[in-house]
Every structure is written in structure tokens, then in C-alpha cells.
Amino acid sequence: MEYWMKNENMCNRCILNDQFPSIEFDRNGICNYCHKWDKEWAEFDYNKAEQQLQMIFKDAKLKKRKYDCMVPYSGGRDSSYVLYLCKKKYGMNPLAVTFNNLFMSDYALKNILSTVPKLGVDHVMVSLQPDLLKSFYRAMILKGGEFCSICTCGINYVITVYQQLFNIPLVLSGVSSRVDEQSPFEVTSTHPSYVRKVLLESGFSIEDIDSLLVKRQYELTAIEKIKMKLTDSDFLRINMPDYLSWNNQEIQETLENELHWQTPDKNMDHIDCRFAPLKTFLKNKQIPHFIFKQEKYSQLIRDGQMTREEAINSLDAAIKHEHEPPAELTDFLNFFDITLEDIENKEGHCHLDFITKEDTFVRESMAYKFLAIPWKILRVFRA
């Protein structure tokens, strides 16, 4: 499949083509991904959304916990901005938490060490056993053709453990369904069921696996969810970009001016991860001509932050270099003790070897649906 190719079968609005998973076009040549975006964001009311956000913050403060909220903090652009807004604009008392994935960039570390004291917030960095964590990554690379899922599990571990430890009512993220890439299941997955199956097949013990994989909020049983609500230990997790304008250029300028935040390239995403360029390189071993940026750029086109022509030109430039090994490749191979042959992935190993889309669906029992009615009514009333 040619997941990126300029042709007449490309969406007339964004830059996804007819080879993209589950894509459909209307009679005007506009894809279903654009229509889905419009349904959620075309009539987005910034003023109303920010009022809702302020109500959420007010509720969190009224609980009078040690921390009003938690911010998963990588030292990257979005999480730095979330932490800045949380403290400086909205007067929240956050706990910043960082998962040490073993290959944070120097820029991320510098930004963390400078931003935390400037904002005057508490910060925790959590590290798992380095050798065990590295072996988890290695297993995912060899059997799943990727390594991002371990980071996702690690971040979730830190969030869950420290939320429960301090009974924090709110978790604030910089991830956005409006401007960030939203890869369909056919492209990638970080679902814990997939990770667990890979690690079990790789020979890890249940005890070792459970040191990383904790239940995400949507995986809790009905009894666990009800118990959390009755003890007021439930927590809300929201994405800040879903409530506010989220313009990359404006964010960059704010961070530079207010926090002296640093980046090697203003147009570069994921400056917090030393091995970020390997993400697309490995995916191309499974799917020829797949560039994650096509999803990101399509989102920015829909949000009015990028023109279609700019996106096409940028993707053309990326495609020309897609088969060139990233500069970080040698460091990557040495770090995980693997060879170039190991990552060629001639068999096309990926998450689809371990889980189906149905495995990721949230299934709530009738008992929970019935008992949760009061909380759902309250949520509607507050909105």
C-alpha cells in the first residue's frame, strides 16, 4: 500500500489518500476523517469551552487536596505549556510527574530542570529498573516493530500510582484530538492488552509485567469504579487543547518568552525523545511510505494552522528521505543491543499479530451502567 502518494484519489481538503485505513470520500471528494473532525470541532466555541475548563478547575480546588491536579511532564512543548497555563494563568497547584523512559533528550532534561523552579511547582521523576525496562523495549521492537507502547504504559503507570498516592482529582494532558495525529487502530496501538501479550510471549514473568502495566481508568471493573466514586477517589482526565486555542507558533513564543524554553527546531515535534525519528523509520518497515506527519498535517489543515499546499510540500520532502537511516540509528541499535537485521522486520510484525480492534473496546456491565446513572446526570448538569 502507498500510504502517502500524491494522486487524484487524495482528499480534496486534507492530504490523506484512498489507501489510508477505513477512509471514505463523499461526492465532493472530502474524506470521512475531515467530516469527523468537523462534527466535533467546526463549531468549537472557545469562550464556552474555557468557562467549562474554569468550572473543572474550581471543582478540583474545592476538594482541598494537597495538589489540585497532576500534569504528566515530558519537557516537551505541549506538556510545558500545560504546566505553564495551569500554574500561571489559572492559579492551580499542580504536581508535575515525569516517566524516565531512559532516552529523554538533553533538551527535555534542560527544560524540566529550568521550568520546574521557575514555576515553583513540585516535581517527581519516576524510574523503573533500567535493565528490565530496556528489555521491555527490546521485546516490543523485535515482536511489535515499535517501542512507543512501553513509554505510554510507563506514563500511565506514573499517573495512576501518584494520582492514588496523593488522591489528586484532576489530570491535565497536552494531547489533542483536534491538532494531534489520531492514528487508526490499523496503523498503531499502545493498548495494554497488546503489550501484555508481547511481553508474555517474550518470556517475562507476570510479576515483572505488572511492575509496568497497571489498569487504566477505562479498564477498571464495575466494582472498582463504583468504589472509587463512593470514596471520592475518582479522578477526571482532560486534554487542555480540547478547551483552548492550541496554536504551535503561539505556544512556542510563549514558552520562549516566559520560560526561556529551548528546542533544537521550532518545527520539530517530540523534542523530548531522543529516538523519536525512529518511530516513522520502523513503521515504514511495516507500511511503505507511511509518514505519521500526514496525519498531523491533515489535522493542522482542518484547524486552519496549515495550508494544503504547505502540507503536500512538507510531506514530499519527508518522503525523499524516508529510507535514509535517521542519524540516531546507530545509537538506537547500541542502546537496545539489537542489529539492523533485527529491525528490518521482513515478516511485518506489528500489533495486529496480537490483538484485534474488538479487544480494545470498553465493555461496561449492565450493573455499572445502572449504578453510574447519578454521576452521568451530574456531569450533564455541570456542563
Image: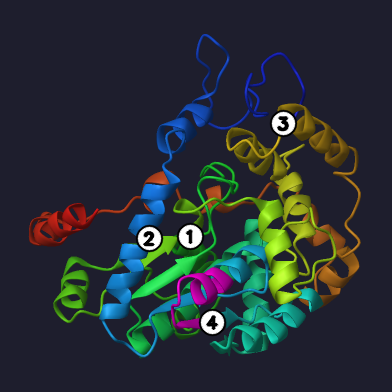
Tag 2: residue type? Leu
Q: Say if mark 2 contacts mark 1, CB within 8 Å.
A: yes
Of the numbered discs 3 and 2, the one sitting upstream in the chain is: 2
Mark 4 or mark 1: name the one nearer the start of the chain: 4
Question: Residue at 54% of width from left, 64% of height from top?
Answer: 198
Image point 42% across, 71% down: which residue?
171
Residue denoted by label 1: 240
Q: Which region is colored magenta?
A: 83-96
Residue at mark 2 to residue at mark 1: CA–CA distance: 8 Å
Q: Which amino acid does label 1 sit on?
A: Met
Element marked by disc 3: loop
Select label 4 or label 1 by which is in front. Answer: 1
**Label 3, label 2: how many angstroms apart (C-alpha)?**
30 Å
Q: According to the image, label 3 marks what residue?
A: 307
Residue 92, magenta (yes or no)? yes
Indicate the secondary structure of the residue bearing disc 2: helix
Q: In this view, does 347 lie above or below 55?
A: above
- Name the residue type under label 3: Thr
Please state which of the two labelled residues, at mark 3 or mark 2, is closer to the viewer: 2
Q: Which residue is drawn at 32% across and 65% down?
A: 56
Amino acid type, label 4: Val
First in residue order: circle 1 vs circle 3: 1
Q: Which of marks 2 and 4 is in front?
A: 2
36 and 91: which is toward the camera: 91
**Which badge, 2 or 1, is on the more N-terminal residue?**
2
Report whether residue 273 is seen: no
Instruction: Return the residue at label 2.
Output: 53
